[in-house]
Image (tube, rainbow, N blue to C red):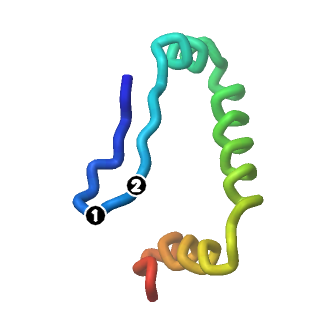
Amino acid sequence: MTVENKRAEPGGYSYDVSNEQLAAFARLTPLERLQWVEDARLFTLMGQTKETRRRHENLRRGGWIDD
């Protein structure tokens, strides 16, 4: 399975998820899946800049990225 960002602008990202990876995730319990999501969230927060944090907070509050 391939998931791609199909924006018109240059850049973006893409990544592949194998059937084996999907099957492994499907075997996790609901609690293990939530822990996986929480671990991913904490990992991404570690790399946030002040600007990224500001934009994230704007979106969380229902605003726009560049408010």
Residue in the picture at 76% in, 59% down: 46
Give whichever of 65, 26 is nearer the camera. Answer: 65
Q: Is residue 26 above or below residue 41?
A: above
Return the residue at label 2. 12
Which amino acid, by three-letter code, is at mark 1?
Glu
Name the mark on residue 31: none
Residue in the picture at 37% in, 29% down: 2
Q: Is mark 2 in CB contact (under 8 Å) with mark 1?
A: yes
What is the C-alpha distance between the residues marked 2 and 1?
8 Å
Classify mark 1: residues with Cα within 10 Å, few (<14), some (14-19) or many (20+).
few
**In the displayed structure image, the side of residue 54 where residue 1 appears, left or right:** left
- Quadrant assignment, res 39: top right
Return the residue at label 1. 9
**In the displayed structure image, the side of residue 21 where residue 67 appears, left or right:** left
Element carrying mark 1: loop
Residue 8 locus on image (x, y percent): 23, 59
